[in-house]
Image: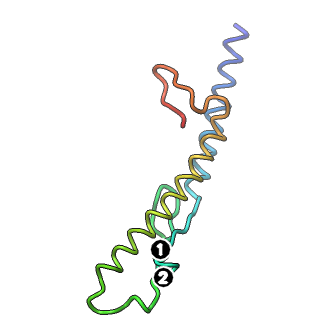
């Protein structure tokens, strides 16, 4: 019975670590850029766009397709960075369980 109690305590501790990591992930921010910094996109949490900055030199009539491509590229850059940070937070929270594939359990990175 002691082993079961110890296992339950470990599971509860891991659950708390995962909840803490999710809270940190909700506040995590990342910034991505494209066009040599002419466009920047800031993301927060799971990918919420919090700011888009566009250099005035890109505000040229008829160049909207280029601007749109730069915005998409900056968003992709920010999302990649945000995903890397969030993955690291979850791996840290999962500890030795990270990467394990236990039948019936969700995979933890």
Mark 2 to mark 1 CA distance (whole Å): 6 Å
Left or right: where 44 falls relative to 10: left
| Front position in the image: 32 or 14 | 32
- Image quadrant in which the C terminus is located: top right
Q: Residue at x 30, y 83 (%)?
A: 64
* Residue at the far top in the pictured view: 1
Left or right: where 89 falls relative to 43: right
Element assignment for label 1: strand
Q: Do the residues labelled 2 and 1 touch (CB within 8 Å)?
A: yes
| Front position in the image: 9 or 95 | 95
Vertical placement of 48 versus 18: above or below?
below
Left or right: where 38 falls relative to 5: left
Element assignment for label 2: loop
**Residue holding disc 2:** 38
Q: Where is residue 26 in the image (x, y as percent from the top left)?
A: 55, 55
Q: Where is residue 36 in the image (x, y as percent from the top left)?
A: 51, 78
Vertical placement of 49 versus 95: above or below?
below
Q: Which residue is drawn at 48% across and 60% down?
A: 79
Q: Label for residue 34? A: 1
């Amino acid at each position: 019975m002691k082993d079961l109690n110890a296992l339950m305590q470990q599971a509860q501790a891991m659950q708390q670590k995962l909840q803490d990591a999710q809270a940190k992930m909700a506040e995590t921010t990342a910034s991505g850029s494209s066009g040599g910094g002419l466009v920047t996109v800031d993301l927060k949490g799971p990918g919420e766009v919090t700011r888009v900055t566009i250099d005035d030199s890109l505000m040229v009539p008829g160049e909207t397709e280029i601007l749109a491509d730069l915005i998409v590229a900056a968003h992709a850059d920010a999302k990649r960075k945000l995903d890397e940070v969030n993955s690291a937070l979850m791996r840290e929270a999962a500890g030795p369980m990270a990467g394990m594939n236990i039948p019936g359990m969700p995979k933890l990175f």
